[in-house]
Amino acid sequence: MIYQPIRLAFSVSTKQLCRIPGPIRISTVRWMASPIEKLTILRKSFDGEKIDAYLLPSTDAHQSEYLAEFDFRVKFLSGFTGSNAFVLVTRDKALLWTDGRYFIQAEAQMSGDWKMMKQAVPDAITPTEWINSNMAKGSIIGFDPDIMTYDEARSMGGRLKSVGYTMKAVHGNLVDRFWKDRPSLPNKKLICLSKEETGAGVGEKLTRVREGLKGKQCTALVLLALDDIMWTLNIRGGDIEYNPLAYSILLITESDAHLFIDPAKLDDCSRSHLGNVSIHGYDDAKPFLKKYAQSLEGTSATVFVPGSTNFAIGELFESRMYQSVSPIQEMKAKKNDVELTGIRRASIRDAVALSKYLMWMEKQVMGGADLTEEAAGKKIDEMRTHEEKFVDLSFGTISAVGAHAALPHYHPSNGSELVKCTTSEVFLVDSGAHYRDGTTDVTRTIWIGGKVPAEFRRDNTLVLMAHIDMASTVFPAGINGIRLDAISRQALWKYGLDYNHGLGHGVGHFLNVHEAPGISHRRYTDSNLLHEGTVITIEPGLYMEKKWGIRIENVYELVGASVPSGASFLAFRPLTWLPIQREIIDCFLLEERHKQWLNEYHSKTLSIQKEEISKRSGDHSEVLQWLEKACAPI
């Protein structure tokens, strides 16, 4: 699944980390109010707050990448449902910035009262630049300090101040004040993972964190990123669809740890699991942290506050703050042996389910079944539920026919779910699951039967070459992922083609399907350093508007590579073992090394899946015959 965090002028974070909800004042606006009515009501609050514009990142109480409906303010206000958006509303303009995954979608979903602004393309204008070019000097720009990070607010505020503008913290989100029918938050119990499942107990992880803090001469760490907290405490939640996260905040000091969470999410088992971690109500976090910060006055104590901490909390520690990337990011990214073993096993089980699904798709389409893309997507969702240790999907399945496949994050809606899977168009399925021992994310592009256009066959082959070029690369350990991205694009660039998203993203261990590090071409971040034990995707694509979309995605683990110099180098080892459709490859375009890679990949895919299937009861002869054909050499 494609992940492309975008850093604007004020640096939208890779992992949008937490805010504490401010007071919510509700009036009587109808849920079904039109976009212009909502903008009108929002603007009416400007005078009372003495602001001329309002900034609204599409984030939640924890700046998560994906949102619970409770926090989907940008969707409520604009109608746009993409995972990346940043809104600026002035007294007469409403602008929404997003990246290339969503250009077509944003234009389709927003009314004429809104203007879509492009990120990460040549000549893109940032919000800061737009304000400087279009608003009167002296204008005051409001922002929610519980959403914007401390670093972002200080950085953007400094740039705006230098050219005659002021940023003002407005407490209590202005949209929340009139969102009458705001959905409620889920309230699911925590899942607790044992040391046997994670490879390290809670106490071991806290000790490791404290040792790292000593090395930086810090006395405490404030954690706001939900995946950081879940990993550290070996817990998982259910507050955000497809993301095993629970709204929480964690303070780790030299001698104790304090978890702020809704007590209703805990039971006797989870309280016992958390052991000596002190439990507080979620709403107690801000006053507790404020009091804790005050207790440090007059001391030499320094608190590690990750750079993506929200402004409201970061401001509490600004006189004694050490800022950097969260230390948990690197710990979490380097999977231990238990985590890697689990992910390998989960990936194999998942691949067997996908093989059965692709075989089923062929039979349905070739048999002329009345199969919609929505039904096709639901089928793989259902098939995965029968796999051992299945917990949930890792994201909403992307099931796209024809031109819909050109929308990287397409989901059937508003009648489009009636589009049929046929022999005359491409079908793209991007899907994944959470198992207790690992998380998966796989994309396959197929064309079942029918006459395949030569142009599509060429495009698909170029994407395959891009994938193989990256998967075959050996590179120095510890480099930043941005240095690898261009390698995968050479095959496409030779034809003047490209794709407007990053090449890959980290994958969690029964955690977020998107995590650091990533391989992306648009920006440099300190969290994208690549190390042995990292689990990461390779997913080049090509999207021809109104024609087709193509993406080939596998998950890989980074392993040590042997090089003549003896230096520390890494290579990609596949975790995903699933056939790549051979019938839509133009073999004349492939170099011998591409053919060799594909044949070896398919040979091992067949061997691994056969071994897994042999362990299962029942007659599996049909899927084994399908695999033999799908994995035949080219």
Image (cartoon, grey):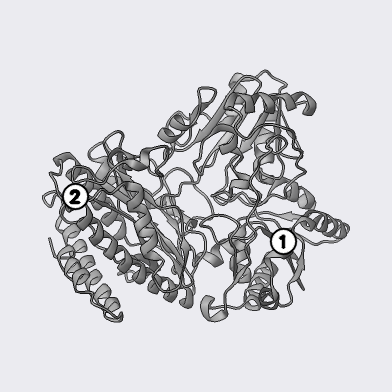
Q: Nearer the viewer, residue 472 or 556?
A: 556
**Could you tell me residue 51's position as x and y percent?**
74, 26
Question: Dot 1, how many residues are within 10 Å of its Cα: few (below 14), some (14-19), or many (20+)?
Answer: some
**Could you tell me residue 367's position as x and y percent?**
17, 53
Q: Is residue 326 left or right of residue 395?
A: right
Q: Quadrant of the C terminus?
A: bottom left
Q: Nearer the viewer, residue 252 or 509?
A: 509
Tell me whether the residue at label 2 lies in contact with that at label 1, contact meaning CB atoms closer than 8 angstroms: no
Where disc 1 sits, the SS reads: loop
* Residue 393 sits above or below residue 111 on the image: below
**Closer mark to the observer between disc 2 and disc 1:** 2
Q: Quadrant of residue 479?
A: bottom left
Q: Quadrant of residue 454?
A: top left
The answer, for residue 217, to whether it is visible in the render is no
**Could you tell me residue 398's position as x and y percent?**
38, 49
The answer, for residue 495, to whether it is visible in the render is yes
Residue plotted at (69% across, 34% down):
158
Q: In this figure, what is the number of numbered marks?
A: 2
**Could you tell me residue 478's position as x and y percent?**
46, 62
* Residue 22 sits above or below residue 510 on the image: above
Question: Dot 2, how many residues are within 10 Å of its Cα: few (below 14), some (14-19), or many (20+)?
Answer: few
Q: Of the numbered discs in the image, which one, if any, rests on residue 262?
A: 1
| Cα–Cα gap, marks 2 and 1 | 51 Å
Q: Which residue has dot 2 on it? A: 368
Q: Amino acid at mark 1?
A: Asp
Residue plotted at (32% across, 43% down):
405
Where disc 2 sits, the SS reads: loop
Marks 2 and 1, the one that precedes in the sequence: 1
Q: Amino acid at mark 2?
A: Gly
Q: Is residue 469 left or right of residue 11?
A: left
